[in-house]
Amino acid sequence: NAGVMQNPRHLVRRRGQEARLRCSPMKGHSHVYWYRQLPEEGLKFMVYLQKENIIDESGMPKERFSAEFPKEGPSILRIQQVVRGDSAAYFCASSPTPEGELFFGEGSRLTVL
Amino acid sequence: EDKVVQSPLSLVVHEGDTVTLNCSYEVTNFRSLLWYKQEKKAPTFLFMLTSSGIEKKSGRLSSILDKKELFSILNITATQTGDSAVYLCVPSGTYKYIFGTGTRLKVLA
């Protein structure tokens, strides 16, 4: 059973470009969480999705950020018009139940030049 | 407001020492408490605790939850350099997990 798969592992973008981060949850998991982590800081919640539904996006900036988890395919975190402050590690986690154990992917490290 | 407080923030010990990491929390509609270990990559799961007073063990690690006092501890005995990491206490509520900054443990050879 493959773990949570995130890609790309590293992404470099120039200011103003778009970043798309993908997350394939573990097989059988329909609950996906996205977190952002800055260097030397803790994980900050961004968004919680179930298949085709955004359940809680209270941690996501109102502008430029969006997330989806379509019926088919991976969950995608999209950042439009990136700025240097978006540089961070973005972790995806999945769970088989809403409050079960979280399984983390290896993260996507975004660098904005 | 939901919160989690871990102590100490950081800890330096020598191999073979025993450490106790503390976690206090306040979470609306508490469901469970999870412990994770994070090195320079993704957090890895250690324990999930749902009931008070029942110790969970895995090798040299053990953990226990007190739902009345809203408290949990993680013990590591006979520490090794490979135990060096940030340890995260993560209480969960309805559809949410609360992450703090963790306890940074460094084990010296």
Image (tube, coloured by chain):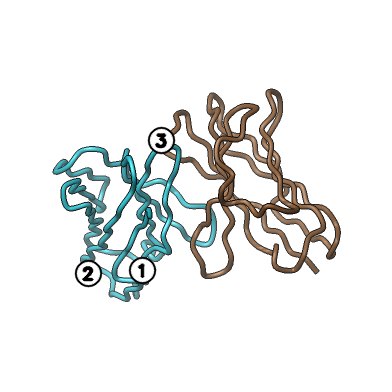
Chain colours: A brown, B cyan
Residue at the image position 23 percent from the left and 50 percent from the top: B63
Answer yes or no: are tags 2 and 1 on the same subunit: yes
In front here: A101 or B24? B24
Q: CA distance from mark 2 to mark 3?
A: 34 Å
Mark 3 or mark 1, which is nearer to you?
3
Mark 2 or mark 1, which is nearer to you?
1
Q: Mark 2 sits on what residue?
A: B17
Q: Mark 3 sits on what residue?
A: A99
Give the x, y percent position of residue B11.
32, 74
Relative to residue A29, is residue B63 depicted above or below?
below
Splitting the image into 4 quarters, where does residue A13 fall?
Answer: bottom right
Answer yes or no: are tags 3 and 1 on the same subunit: no
Q: Give the structural element (helix, strand or loop) at label 3.
A: loop
Say whether disc 2 or disc 1 marks the residue closer to the N-terminus: 2
- Residue A88 horizontal side relative to residue B54, left or right: right
Q: Give the structural element (helix, strand or loop) at label 1.
A: strand
Residue at the image position 56 percent from the left and 35 percent from the top: A55
Quarter containing the C terminus of chain B: bottom left
Give the x, y percent position of residue B16.
23, 68
- The chain holding disc 1 is B
Image mark for residue B105: 1
Q: Are marks 2 and 3 in contact (CB under 8 Å)?
A: no
